[in-house]
Image: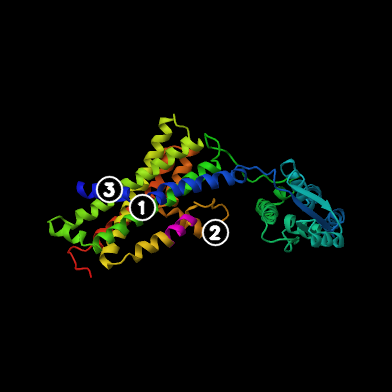
Amino acid sequence: MKPFLIKDFKILLRDRSELVALLLMPFIIMGILGTALSGVMEGDTSSIEIELAVVENDVPEEGITAFQTQLENRGLPPESEAELAEASTAVHPVGLLHEMLESPELADMVHVETMNQEEAEAALQEGDLDAVLTFPEQFTEDTLNAMLLNEGSGGDMELLVSDQSSINTTILEDLITGFTNNLNTESAIAAAGGEQAAASSAPIEVGGTETVSQNEPVGAMQYYTVGMAVMFVLYVAGTIAAKAFVEKQQQVYNRIILSGANPWKYLAGKMISTGLIAFAQLTILFMLSALVFQTFEMTSFSFWTGMLAISAVLAACVGCLGGLLTSLSIRTESDTISSIFTGVLVTLFAFAGGSFFPLDGMPDFITAFGSWTPNGAAMNAYLRWMQGFGWTELAWPFTQIGIVSLAAAILSFLLFPKRRSVSS
């Protein structure tokens, strides 16, 4: 088997175009993306300015008064009526939304101005505004009825935007959607908790966020170093399979079998060489990123132990995938499958696995599929390790990669032809 390994390494080292594709290309892309998107991913919003006009066709005070008048006509116990009346003053939605938009966190990013409908639409048409948020008549009353009395469907805000595809529109839509979702959640919990919870004079706090990472959040350069590394390592499997097909076409494979070598040894050699090349590629890319971009600390032995362990598990999986592609290429006597893998499937896996951008907000089926791709599972493991999580947090990603590896290895040996064939 050793001669097979040496042969594959020599063939790859002589192919400069493949070396450029496997090492230089991902290094260049990780540098470009990490530098260009560092501000966005690390929370720099200084360059974002959203001009928003608020049109209030609803008068919140009148809505609150109308709601409280309803309470008086319901014959509720005095204590319940007083509590609901107090809650309507404290949690009316228009006021809460204004507080959110004018909070210190958003004040520099979102500029809010109150206008009437005609002025706002004219400014939107002239391009002076990014969006117009309109509260219709009786919005406050309808929303309080839904929130505190669980009656009606609530009020509907209207958001008009100047450019549906702009980043400002996306940010604003996310803010409004997050506000309404949070408000609906609080209302549901209040309704489930009874009138006492619904009448609380302060907004209901639903859980919280606790930072468990021991290190700083992952930066853009770190993210794209990992993203490009786990993407381009998949190309190793396709490259080795393509070269195996060339060997088959040039009768190299048949001569190896005629020499008395076990066919499975040839396949095992392909899998091992693919894994070793993949591990070398990952190690070189991470080391180069650490040296050139200062992405990682070079002096932390425990950190690099984890990174190398994850790389070894991923490389083993790539080796099994390389074996599967090799089996299919030799069995079908065609390099179509390896070409489809490198030309289509790698890009699909990279997208679903989060190599191009974080998958927060993506549909569940995409994130679920991506977590079972070798690159997606490995990326989860790398990011967890870089955030300071322990070995126990790597158990599930390792299990996912192991299952994929085992399946690919079994299929490789089942599909690999046991006898030599004549190639035209």
- Whichever of callouts 1 and 2 sits on the residue coming sooner in the sequence is 1
The image shows a total of numbered marks equal to 3
Distance from Cα at disc 3 to Cα at disc 1: 15 Å
For badge 1, the amino acid type reads Val
What type of secondary structure mainly makes up the magenta span?
A: helix
Q: Which residue is mark 3?
A: 10
Task: Kindly report the distance in space between the C-alpha atoms of the residues bearing marks 1 and 2.
Answer: 29 Å
Q: Residues within 10 Å of mark 3 (few under 14, many from 20)?
A: few
Residue 134 seen in the current view:
yes
Q: What residue did someone put label 2 on? A: 363
Q: Position of residue 227 (x, y in %)?
A: 48, 48
- Around disc 2, counting alpha carbons within 10 Å, would you say few (fewer than 14), some (14 to 19), or many (20 or more)? few
Q: Position of residue 381 (x, y in %)?
A: 44, 44
Badge 2 marks a residue whose secondary structure is loop
User: In this rendering, which labeled residue sits more in front, label 2 or label 3?
Assistant: 3
Viewer-closest of 382 and 6 = 6
Is residue 103 toward the left or the right of residue 382 in the image? right
- Which residues, given as a range, are shown in magenta? 344-351
The label shown at residue 236 is 1
Left or right, residue 362 beside residue 5: right
Pointers 1 and 2 in contact (C-beta within 8 Å): no
Q: Amino acid at mark 3?
A: Lys
